[in-house]
Image (cartoon, coloured by chain):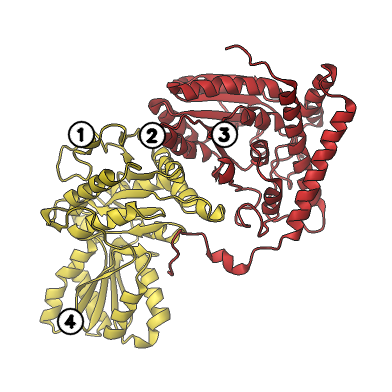
Amino acid sequence: MSQKTFGNAINDALSTAMDMDDTVFIAGEGVGVSIHNDPNMPTHGLLDKFGRRRVKDTPVSEAAIAGLAVGASCMGLRPIVEIMFFPFITLASDMLVNHAGKLRYMSGGKSSFPLTVRVKAGVGFGAGSQHSDNLEAWVAHSPGLKIVWPATVEDAKGLLLSAIFDPDPVIVVEDMMLYRMKGEFPDADFRTPLGKARVAVPGTDCTVIAYGMALYTAMKAIEPLTEKGISCEVIDLRSLVPLDKTCILESVRKTGRLVVVHEANRFCGFGAELAAMVAEEAFYDLKGPVKRVGAPQIPVPVAPSLEKVFIPGPEDVVRAVLETMAK
Amino acid sequence: MKKRQLTSDFQIQFFSRMVLIRTFEEKIVALCRESHPLPGMQILANGQEAVATGVVSALEPDDIIVSNHRSHGHLLARGADLNSLMAEIMAKADGVNHGKAGTLHLSVPEINAPMTSTVVGAGPPLAVGAAFAQQYQALNGVTVVFFGDGAAAEGSVHEAMNLSGIWKLPILFVCENNGWAGAQRPEEHSAARQIHKRAQGYDMPGRCVDGNDVEAVYHLSLELLEHCRSGKGPAFMETMTYRMRGHGEQDHQHYVNPEELEAWALKCPIIRYRRALLNAGILDKGQIQRIEQDAEAHVAAAVAFGEASPYPESDTAMTDVFVQAFNS
């Protein structure tokens, strides 16, 4: 066990994978020499350790970076490429959506694409809409792509290592707001399986599902709700695709209520899929309406007073839980 | 570089391949006109056979091909199995991609053509990945990517050329300039007419060749492939040819000047080469007839194979998305 940061855990996963397997390489804008000289940044020190053959700084060319991953993985390498900010995935989206996600299917199962895309995400630091949109619903909607979103230091390492050695394309979203969060992770090749959610806090009255940074928003709502005599069961989703329906449905069947929380726009957000899935598969177990907590349908504003309107807070979670509890 | 002396066997092979490609695609034209049309859009490369044959004949077995929506010639020149190719064009179960690719997305890993994309301009970034893998593993192979003059207007092509120029990746960019991007002329989609001159901006050699002269294409390919293989980085070849049919078989070329089409018909790469081989005494009319009959017979057999194959079972629609299937 190491007592370190979320960023260190990602770094450890990358280093472990590269030590284990020479087909693993990393590429992206500033993954070798970064404008940040910060040991909490995920690729810090990897250039010194592994050299220029395996740590590839690229031009500012997201389509070529993603194409590099698709083409190299088709040839048997295990590329890990970085997209610097989630909104920039739009520039890589043809390679990811039309190629990483479809070429295996269109080949009739003959080709495979074991690539990993690390996407740096998160709102809350005044970077504005073109640096802090969360587009996980776009990815999840596209067939052939997996997408995971670690919230804990342990999962930052475990999910990434699983993604790297998974035979299919996996998008790993990293909340930049969590890079400096302290915690522990096991040494060596430690993996968190893809497609397994985690009950972060057990409870009996209302299920609250969140992922990434939003998990901590949900956690902050527990205390005020406990004071009102409401016991929440908080699920750390970890993996959007594959989706752990079993964990979700078991919890909802027990509590009869569901609130989903994410920092992306509520409208057509991933929470809508969770709400619809539960409505289809556990409707008669529900005791109240499913509630979604997310951002309003606006671009992410910059001013702190406006950004606060965008990012859902613990009070929004409390309100949603109280509404579904009809209190 | 000195021209490699071509043996007459090799020249006959060039001719046979071009005839096979033309016969194969003419058969698709015929099938499109029959009562049970092929699924999807049929997009053909009639008139461009010398590019496919010349480039692909210059490749080594381990070299990689990244192709596009006009892929039949590239794959046939590489020796793809006719039966499973035609069955795939018919979207049948015994097709090379089991009915999931159809004519447009044919990928044939067996002949090192594992990635074909119909997204115009998407081939070059994919080629970056394949060529990187060759360089990373010191494989000594080259990746050849075929795209059109229309595709050259895509930003992804710029990104791929720039990155491969920086990293000295072994990529041969083959721009098949067939005179049309959909219904648009070069003056409508290319600010400067000579696309190969863009190569200079990416620190790679850029050359132009008569794309209807199979031997010229072959020789220039060999020269540029040698450049790529020797670690000097990518190269760019523009082949001047002509799209003799519409963009696809639903396009009846109402916008094409018939005189221009007739002029290019006279420059047909197969007619030209037939005449050259006849004049040189390498083939006689009887031999040519046998080559044509041979191609007809192989293509007819492929059509019969495809027709005998069933459409894939409906439950296979759900397979091959991921290596390890899961329910969502």
Amino acid beneath label 3: Pro
* Chain painted in red in the figure: B
| Disc 4 versus disc 2: nearer the observer | 2
User: Which mark, residue A161?
Assistant: none
Residue neighbourhood size for the residue with mark 3, other residues' Cα within 10 Å, grouped as few (<14), some (14–19), many (≥20)? few
Q: What is the C-alpha distance between the residues marked 4 and 2?
A: 54 Å
Let me know if marks 1 and 4 both belong to one chain.
yes
| Disc 3 versus disc 2: nearer the observer | 3
Q: Residue B273, percent across and down?
A: 78, 24
Q: Which residue shows up at 38% across the image and 47% down it?
A: A89
Q: Is residue B214 left or right of residue B61?
A: right
User: Which mark, residue B136?
Assistant: 2
User: Which mark, residue A48?
Assistant: 1
User: Which mark, residue A231?
Assistant: 4
Q: What is the C-alpha distance between the residues marked 3 and 2?
A: 19 Å
Q: Nearer the viewer, residue B142 or A27?
A: B142
Q: Name the residue under label 3.
A: B61
Residue neighbourhood size for the residue with mark 4, other residues' Cα within 10 Å, grouped as few (<14), some (14–19), many (≥20)? some
Amino acid beneath label 1: Asp
Residue neighbourhood size for the residue with mark 2, other residues' Cα within 10 Å, grouped as few (<14), some (14–19), many (≥20)? some
The local secondary structure at tag 1 comes to helix
Can the viewer see residue B178?
no
Q: What is the C-alpha distance between the residues marked 4 and 3?
A: 66 Å
Q: Is residue A51 left or right of residue A144?
A: left
Tell me the quadrant of the picture where the C terminus of chain A can be found. bottom left
* Chain painted in yellow in the figure: A
Does residue B155 lie above or below A113 as drawn? above
